Each structure stands twice: as structure tokens, then as C-alpha cells.
Image: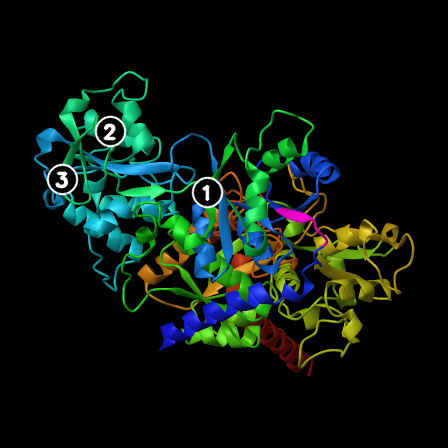
Amino acid sequence: KHQMALSYERFFALFLSLTICAAVAPPDDGKLRVCVVESRGIYRKAPKFCPQLQDNSNIECVIGMDRLDCVRRIHKGTAHFGVLSAEDLIAARWASVEILVASEMRSHESPFEYEIVAVVNNDANIHTVHDLHGARLCHPGYGLENHWTEVLANYFEAAMVSKTCKAELTLTEDRIAASAKYFGPSCKAGPWVPDAKQDRILKDRYPSLCHMCYDPYSCDDSDKHWGRRGTLYCLTNGGGSVSWARLDDTLSHFGLAGLPAQDDPAKYSYLCPDGHLQPINVTRPCIWVSKPWPVVAAHRSHAAQVQRLVTGLSHDEPHSWQNALLSLLETYHAFTVPLDNVIPVDDYLNQAIGYQSAYSFPECNPPRSIVVCTSSIIEHNKCSWLQEAAQVYGVEPNIQCIRTMNLQQCMEDTEFKSSDVVIVNQEQRVQAQRDYGLQPLLFEFAEGMHERYVTIALVHKNSEYKTFKDLRGARACLPSFEGAAHMAVQETILNVTGHVETLHSYFNRDSCLWHPHKGRECPLHYKGEEGALRCLAEGADVAFLSSSVYKKYVSGNMTGDWLKPDTHLSYRLICPYGGIERRSKFEYCYLHWTTRGHVMTHSSTTARQSEIYNSLQHMDHLFGKKYKSETRSFTLYGAFDKHNDVLFHDNTDSLRSEEDLQRNEAKRNMEHIFQRYVSKYYAVRAESGAQQSYGSFFSLVLLLL
């Protein structure tokens, strides 16, 4: 029942995300709108070719964040057509998006982008698929995102080997263990999981799957038996029994595509899915699975028109709209091949042998989905599209998305394991960990210091305060209670004075510290980052706030009736740990830093923690800032449907572990401070110090008497 509810929520979220903006589709003005996604790298084709296209035709550009953004735009009618991959078509079909396939974008004449075959050594006594038990498998390995997805990489084993679904194993380890048990010594090089330590543990635990690699211990993506050609060298030079390989690579390897043969093709055969063998030089080899070409897909109402438009596009006339449109559509040199008729996605994908069945292998029951809690409609929409994208690229276990009324409900649901993951910012971190027992699993890391939360201390330029110690008794302003700035100040007091004091005892009683039960009740317009700066401007002595807010202020990008011209010249920084760090590229001295987003989860088994960690890291590799595909399928960190900072912060560069944060060159990361605060380290030390002070005072009074 729980799974049915999640599936219903997933469908509703996708339906809502597709329909919520339908009302704002532009009126039909006779223009065709092509959805353009820029390729990775610094080159941008839209500024060059979109004006050329619009000036010479009735076609105009709509810039998509990613290919699935184009799917949504085509569905809503804000764009009419664009280029989609076969994986995008699967995701669109799952989301019930009605688009039609008009033409293929090919780079060669073959009917499919590539086809995958099983090649066996004739001396291995493999005559049917039943003889594969104990065979020495040569596999291309992992980390070939540009060449094939994990779904296709795992197709052969998924067809041969059943999952055990043991609760004590992650889904990835379950698959690895089953393959190790079924096959004999094999080679599956490359990263089995994103985390290097866990990858090493798995390879030590199942060494037979690295035994046939050139370097069995490393078993990584530098191995001679890794990759598209490596799997064939493993077969012909490394003693393998069966190779899972692309057909085009196989033909090249055996000298059937114009290159010298690496071995005599007569020694090898194709193993067919129905069990029989074919010679390597056969005219039509038997295929296990085919990968369809990228396509020009269009809204149903404009599909036939789009097909006519893109047929025969070429670069023959450099200044023509045809050249501009083809340049915008292609990611590498390509030509369009129209289908006989515009057809639905299902009909197009069904032409590719095995492709749709690659997504229909049985899953474990109950499912091991990672439930992500969201607290707004737009968050839920993005999460649901992330779920579709992750599933078509073989992330396991995949995520499921639920929505609650607010973040507090999400934290409670995660505490009681109705959800597995909730993402909080630095202000909610203490509450999530202390009040709901959640643990940080990953952190939204940004390379730029201003994109992290970096606490600085700001005073009036002409004030008497020179050092942090001078601030004792000063009127201080904080953005919030128990946020990162509060934590940073608490730790700095300890580091500077050598003992723990509460902020209320260290600073003036008129400070704005936002404790719910202590201290001055300050005006609400002093709350928050900009509020702390305003608090300083209107009479306080020191403000502790984020460096990014001060940078915004200094740059003149902050607005407010309380601002006075050139007042940024009237402030300076207090540097409790000395000046700007040596070799630092950051322009400010600071107290401590933390990340903007914290991925929190409940306490669970090591196996469960590992699979949540690795699934999220896998999504980061596929859809984060360092994606490897030519164009982005889905944008993990960036605007979603014209909204910023949805689910993750736009300026996040990657998800990092705590260990990764500690290795960062910027000093004074705050993780140990959060742990100290939650464990009441500061509170207990401060109370102990107060009691000692009181005891000393009482002893002095008795002595005087």
C-alpha cells in the first residue's frame, strides 16, 4: 500500500509539473520554437546561431536548462520541438508526455546508434546460454557514461542472473555477489560504486570479478581490459570465455571494418539470446540489445511540420537558416533521417531490439527505494523528474518522492523512517540532528567561498574594537539562534579565551541573539542576514553574518530604505584567527565555514546508509556540474522551471562527504562544532565555568568576613 501511494504521488507530481504552467503557453503566432540545450564546455552555440535562425526563418529559440526541461516545455507548448536521447524518451513515456518522434539524428548510416553482442571463444565449450555458468566473463566495466548507460552495461547479467534481494546487502552488492557466484573468474573493471573506500571493500570481497583484469588488484578504469575495446582484448588476449561488447567494436577488433584483425575471427562466435551460435563474419549478427539514435521529437500538433522542416538540413550554406538550425540540433556532426511517419515514443523504441525490456527486469519486493521528503510543490516536481532521470540511467536503488506541509514534518517523517532523506540548510542543521536524531550523510559543497556559509565579524571602522577579545561586553547582532553564525561565534569564544562562555554572558545584554527564552526582544527587521547588518548600521557594535551578504552589500546590490550611501566604507572586519590565510583566494578573514545544504538521514544499518550515499553520489555524477554527456539530461544544481534553489542550491558544485570537507584547503570547517553543540559540550562547559566562578566568589566573601 505504501508503494502504491508513492507511485500515485509520483504520477501526480509529474502530472502537476506538466500542467501547472500550461496556462502560460504563448499564443500561436505562427512561429515554431526549437528547444536548445547547450553542450558542455565553454562554447555556446545559441548566441551565434539563434539570431541567424530567427532573422531568416519563422523559427525562434527557447533555451532549455537540460533535455528533460525541453520535454516539459514541448508538453506545455512553450516549445514545439527539440533533440532527445532514447533515455529521455523512456522518461517522457513514464511521465505520460505526449510527444511524437519525427526524425533521427544520425552520425553514420547504421539503423541504431550502437548494438551490443555477446562474443564467445569457441574453445570455451559454450554452445547455449545455459553453458555460461562458470564462464570467464569479459565486461567493459563501469565509468563509460558517454558510451552506454549502466542499464545496458548490466543487461547481459540481468538476463542471466537473478537477484537474491538479501536485506543485509545493498542492491549493488547483491548484483555483484550474484554475478560472482554465477560466473567464473572475470573482469569488470572501473568504479563499482562512487565511494572509493566502499569500492575497495567490494573488490576485496568479490575478487573473482577482477581476476581476469590485467591488474586484478586495481581493477580500475585504467586497466587494459577496461572499456569498449578492453573487453575484447580480455577475450582474445586475456583468456576470457565470453565478452559483452558493442558490435562496431567487435567488427573492428576482428578486422571486419577496415582495421587489422587482433585475432582470427574463426576462433570466436556470436552467442545469440535464443541460445544458438553464429560465426563472427555472418552478414546479420544476432543482437542482444540495440540503442536507438537521438531523435528530433515534437509536440503532436506540430510533428509533421517539424519533420518536413528538418528533412535535408545541411551545412552547405554557412549563413542559411538551415545551417543554423542543424548547428543548434546537433552535438557532433550529424544528419537527419526522417521516419516514414511521425510515430509515438513506444512505437519508435520498440524498433530497437531489447531496449525497452532492459527497463523491465524484476525488482526486489518490497522495493528498496530511497524516500526523499519535500515540503513544496516545486520541490516535489523536481524530485519526481529526478526520479525519472535516475531510473533511466540505472541508479539503484532509485529515489521515491513524498511531499509534506513543511520542513518540520519532513524531519519528523525521516526520524520515524517514513522518509529516508531530507535536505536542510545551516539554520535547521542543529534542530534536525538534536531534536529529530538525524545524521548528516552528504553536504552541498561549493568551490567558491561566498557560495558556502562563511561567518565574518563586522564592526564600525572607527570603533575601539581591534581584536575579538575586545568584543566582550559589545552589543552584538546575529542572524538567528542556533544557526551557523551562532555556532561559529560560540567556538571562537572558546578558541580566543580558552574557556566556554554563553553568548549572553560574553556580549552586552542589549545584543540581538534571538534566544527564545533569554535576552533582549529585538525588532524582527533585525533578524536574518540582512537584518544583522541593519542592526549594526543602526547602533550595534558588531554583527556576525555571512560573507556573501556583506559582499552583496559592498557591491551595491542590496536594497532597503535603511541603507545609506557609501556606508560600506565605514565598516571593517575583526580577524580572530589572524589576517587572510596564506595562499587563500578568499578576500575576507573569517571565523568558520560550513556548507549551505546538509543531506540528513535517519540512523540505519551500514548497508542502508551505503546505498543511500552511493545512489545520491551516482546522481551527482550523472546530473551535477561535472556530467560527462554532451548535453545535460537533467540539472541537479540549477534553476528548475524558472525557480531557483529548488531541492538543492543552484551554486552547489558537488555532494561531498564529511571526510572530503575536512580535506578542503579552507581552514575551520564547522562539522565538529555542530557535533559539540548537539552533544551539549558548550552548555555543560559554560554551566561548569559559571559554577566555578560562583564558588570562587563565595569563598572570597567568606574569607573577607
Is any atom of residue 676 visible in this view? no
Front one among 472 and 50: 50
Residue placed at 69% from the left, 52% from the top? Answer: 576
User: Label 3 to label 1, Cα distance in Å?
Assistant: 33 Å
**Of the two numbered discs 3 and 2 in the rendering, the one whose residue sits closer to the viewer:** 2
Residue stretch in magenta? 29-34
Colour style of the rendered protein structure: rainbow
Q: Is residue 291 above or below residue 21?
A: above
Label 3, on which residue?
A: 276
Q: Quadrant of the N terminus?
A: bottom left
- Mark 1 residue crowding within 10 angstroms, few (<14) / some (14–19) / many (20+): some
User: Is 484 on the left-hand or right-hand side of 228?
Assistant: right
Locate residue 573, reporting x and y percent. Answer: 77, 51
Proximity of marks 3 and 2: CB atoms separated by less than 8 Å: no
**Residue 402 percent coordinates (x, y):** 48, 71
Q: Mark 2 vs mark 1: which is more N-terminal?
A: 2
Per the image, is 132 magenta? no
Q: Earlier in the sequence, mark 3 or mark 2?
A: 3
Name the amino acid type tagged 2: Thr
**Mark 3 vs 1, N-terminal side:** 3
In the rendered view of the protein, which quadrant contains the C terminus?
bottom right
Q: Is residue 618 above or below residue 533?
A: above
Q: CA distance from mark 3 to mark 2?
A: 16 Å
The residue that appears at 21% across and 46% down in the rendered structure is 206
Numbered badge on residue 339: 1
Q: Provide residue 592's location: percent of width, then percent of height.
A: 62, 54
Would you name the residue on which mark 2 appears? 283
Q: Is residue 34 left or right of residue 626?
A: right
